[in-house]
Image: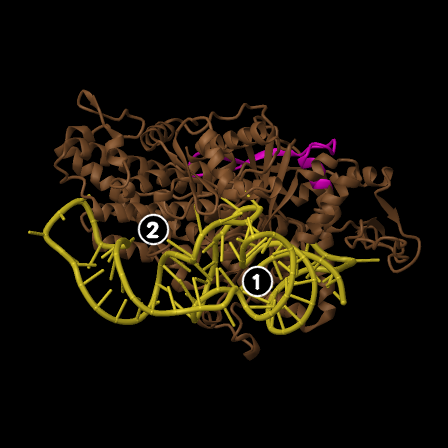
Chain colours: A brown, B yellow
RNA sequence: GCGCCCGUAGCUCAGUUGGAAAGAGCGUCUGCCUUCUAAGCAGAGGGUCGGGGGUUCGAAUCCCUCCGGGCGCGCCA
């Protein structure tokens, strides 16, 4: 609701200034520092003063006097050196906010609406998922929810690099270190915790290959066999990678993260996506065969130089950076494959995968996978994106840029603009945490704020271990409070709390910040955490549950209901009026501001904004909760009003948490 | 060397396109459970927003410079 009023005020000011002063200035608005100064402020007169060479305060006064009434705004005042402060019609805002919260969020998108494809998770299928992968998945999933909330049609892809070096290494391990047969590996892969087995094996293989450079031949040979896709090694790789993907999905299902399509690199290879892309790149002159120099024999893509050429100077004689796309031995690099893949995502490649059903998520949603042949009927029309987001850590910014540049050079400028790297920073460990995990830290690293871990060395916090710990911790708290509840109820509560804590822990940090992981913070259920927000919802639930036994009006109290008590309407203005109603009004205002925060979050691609909002609202509610006792309120009309406000807060908290993929239990 | 990111309270982090006196959580100290769940609330203490210049009516935010950290720049992915 806040967004609506704010926009009205901006628009009114822009129009007024254009009419009255014949000029266009950007009208910015912000919240004044105190509620007694209004709800929407604009410093626009400072900017206007500069242009018109008049004192800002006088201009502000002039505008405040002449401005036509704005819907939802009670009055506009001048403050400070020339601020325009708008005071909202509190009762109208509250009514509108209640109505808005009660409505269905957004109409579902038409089946042929422009589609956004988001790729996230994309864990190498050769070992267990760790905390860094969870940051990726949770960020991607929250962004998916945000976009769907705004009415966009979204398709979620999880890229599976099942033919890469990392898988090859594990197969080398099974064959040369473990001396396992295909059947033995098949049996292992069917057992639980296979991803943990591979985690350890991968570490040993890394060590093994490092000990003797000659052994790298094994990896190269293995990679070739896997890419070609036939023979016993390739079959083993297929078994291992697929089993690990199932492990990953089981882990991510614990978090409630769904996918529409698992796109596998093996199909990109076997269905010759690269050949098609190669032709396009050659024909349109995007890549050239280097005849001489250090890249002789390679197909390279010339990148536009980042550096600006100083004025008046010639282009530097040295060529701008060239990126190798096809190696001199004829094999294609990862970036080359990625260009082909992204042509497919946008429906520009002229080829398609076959598809098979692969996994049913706990909520019944079907995830499909790509196949080289024998597609199953009923597959949705995947791909053909209008816009693409790749959730990939910030270290891969450069190759992402190359893909974008490739699309642009091919003449797909629009698609290049709409291919966005949803970048985020890594999850590292605090030195203390690294020590707890038993990793050796070089003395020079000991005083660093965080330490990056190496998956190759088997370092890192495994996702399932962390979730297990969170569930155990939550379970302890639940048992202490709800001994009477049945086992299944307590397990469900503990699970919701654990996931709430984990998702919130990863989402409250903005994308560009390195997360310094620490068990103490990650396992906390107090303070700025998911459970804190969930707890606020639970408190409202408690009020409504208990209240229903005493007061009839508690029965149907969702915010969609009209603000009625008995036969009359609640006099909302009476309770929200300033200054006596200021504290209630601040809570109502915040509760009605979800739309503005969501808009900012979507615009900035920053789910952390919503996380922050959820906490702010929960905190404001807790203050209110301690100040106002609802059930014992004697004035029936006030009681009804407080109830409605409480209900609005719950709806908004639940909505905000929902966007983060967090559910609040009924009790906790 | 070139490029990107970061430096805000003891610690972990917010601070949306420059806007009114710098915020939160954790930790420390002090209070608050016969009333809707104390996973909570109230209060205290804690900051030259890395340093220095500049632009501006106004800078944590923009520009320059220096210091200190991280990452990327491969015929790896």
Residue extending farthest to the right is A291
Residue in the image at 70% along x and 51% along y: A399
Q: Which mark is residue A531?
A: 2
Mark 1 or mark 2: whose residue is earlier in sequence: 1
Residue in the image at 83% along x and 43% along y: A286
Any part of residue A149 in sight: no
Q: Which residue is mark 1?
A: A455
**Label 2 crowd bin: few (<14), some (14–19), many (20+), radius 10 Å:** many
Give above or below for A495 relative to A555: below
Residue segment shown in magenta: A340-367
Residue in the image at 78% along x and 39% along y: A277
Residue A413 painted magenta: no
Residue extending farthest to the bottom is A443
Horizontal arrangement in the rendering, residue A176 relative to residue A193 (left or right): right
Q: Nearer the viewer, residue A306 or A495?
A: A306
Whether marks 1 and 2 lie on the same chain = yes
Secondary structure of the residue carrying tag 1 is helix
Q: Position of residue A401 (x, y in %)?
A: 71, 48
Instruction: Report how far apart the C-alphas of labels 1 and 2 lie in the structure.
Output: 30 Å
């Amino acid at each position: 609701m806040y967004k609506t009023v704010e926009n009205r005020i901006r628009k009114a000011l822009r129009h007024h200034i254009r009419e009255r002063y014949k000029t266009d200035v950007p009208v910015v608005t912000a919240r004044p520092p105190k509620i007694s100064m209004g709800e929407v402020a604009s410093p626009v007169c400072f900017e206007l003063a500069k242009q018109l060479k008049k004192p800002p305060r006088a201009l502000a006064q002039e505008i405040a006097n002449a401005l036509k009434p704005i819907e939802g705004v009670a009055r506009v005042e001048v403050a400070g050196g020339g601020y325009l402060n708008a005071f909202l019609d509190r009762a109208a805002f509250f009514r509108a906010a209640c109505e808005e919260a009660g409505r269905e969020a957004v109409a579902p998108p038409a089946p042929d609406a422009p589609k956004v494809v988001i790729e996230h998770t994309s864990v190498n299928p050769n070992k267990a998922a760790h905390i860094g992968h969870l940051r990726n998945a949770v960020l991607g999933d929250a962004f998916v929810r945000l976009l769907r909330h705004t009415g966009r049609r979204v398709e979620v892809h999880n890229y599976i690099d099942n033919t890469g070096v990392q898988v090859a290494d594990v197969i080398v391990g099974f064959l040369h270190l473990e001396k396992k047969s295909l059947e033995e590996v098949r049996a292992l892969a069917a057992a639980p915790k296979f991803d943990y087995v591979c985690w350890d094996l991968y570490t040993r293989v890394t060590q093994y290959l490092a000990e003797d450079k000659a052994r790298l031949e094994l990896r190269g040979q293995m990679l070739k066999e896997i890419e070609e896709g036939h023979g016993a090694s390739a079959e083993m790789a297929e078994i291992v990678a697929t089993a690990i993907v199932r492990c990953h999905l089981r882990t991510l299902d614990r978090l409630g993260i769904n996918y529409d399509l698992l796109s596998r690199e093996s199909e990109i290879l076997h269905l010759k996506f690269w050949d098609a892309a190669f032709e396009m790149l050659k024909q349109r002159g995007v890549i050239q065969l280097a005849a001489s120099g250090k890249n002789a024999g390679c197909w390279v893509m010339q990148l536009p130089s980042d550096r600006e050429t100083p004025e008046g100077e010639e282009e530097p004689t040295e060529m701008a950076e060239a990126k190798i796309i096809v190696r001199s031995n004829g094999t294609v690099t990862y970036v080359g494959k990625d260009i082909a893949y992204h042509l497919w995502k946008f429906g520009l490649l002229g080829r398609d995968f076959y598809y098979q059903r692969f996994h049913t998520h706990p909520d019944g949603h079907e995830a499909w996978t790509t196949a080289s042949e024998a597609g199953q009927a009923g597959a949705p029309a995947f791909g053909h994106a209008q816009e693409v987001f790749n959730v990939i850590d910030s270290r891969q910014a450069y190759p992402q840029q190359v893909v974008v540049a490739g699309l642009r050079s091919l003449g797909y400028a629009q698609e290049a603009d709409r291919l966005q790297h949803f970048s985020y920073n890594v999850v590292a460990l605090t030195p203390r945490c690294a020590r707890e995990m038993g990793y050796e830290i070089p003395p020079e690293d000991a005083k660093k704020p965080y330490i990056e871990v190496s998956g190759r060395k088997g370092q890192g916090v495994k996702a399932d271990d962390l979730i297990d710990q969170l569930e155990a911790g939550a379970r302890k708290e639940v048992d202490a409070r709800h001994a009477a509840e049945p086992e299944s109820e307590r397990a469900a509560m503990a699970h919701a709390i654990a996931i709430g804590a984990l998702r919130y822990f990863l989402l409250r940090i903005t994308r560009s910040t390195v997360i310094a992981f620490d068990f103490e913070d990650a396992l906390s259920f107090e303070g700025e955490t998911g459970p804190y927000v969930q707890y606020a919802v639970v408190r409202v639930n408690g009020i409504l549950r208990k209240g229903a036994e005493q007061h009839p009006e508690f029965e149907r109290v969702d915010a969609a209901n009209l603000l009625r008590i008995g036969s009359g309407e609640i006099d909302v203005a009476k309770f929200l009026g300033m200054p006596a109603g200021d504290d209630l009004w601040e809570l109502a205002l915040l509760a009605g501001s979800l739309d503005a925060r969501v808009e900012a979050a979507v615009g900035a691609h920053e789910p952390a904004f919503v996380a922050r909002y959820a906490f702010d609202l929960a905190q404001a509610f807790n203050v209110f909760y301690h100040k106002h006792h609802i059930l014992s309120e004697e004035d029936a009309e006030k009681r009804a009003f407080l109830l409605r406000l409480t209900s609005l807060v719950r709806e908004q908290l639940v909505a905000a948490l929902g966007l983060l993929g967090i559910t609040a239990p009924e009790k906790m």
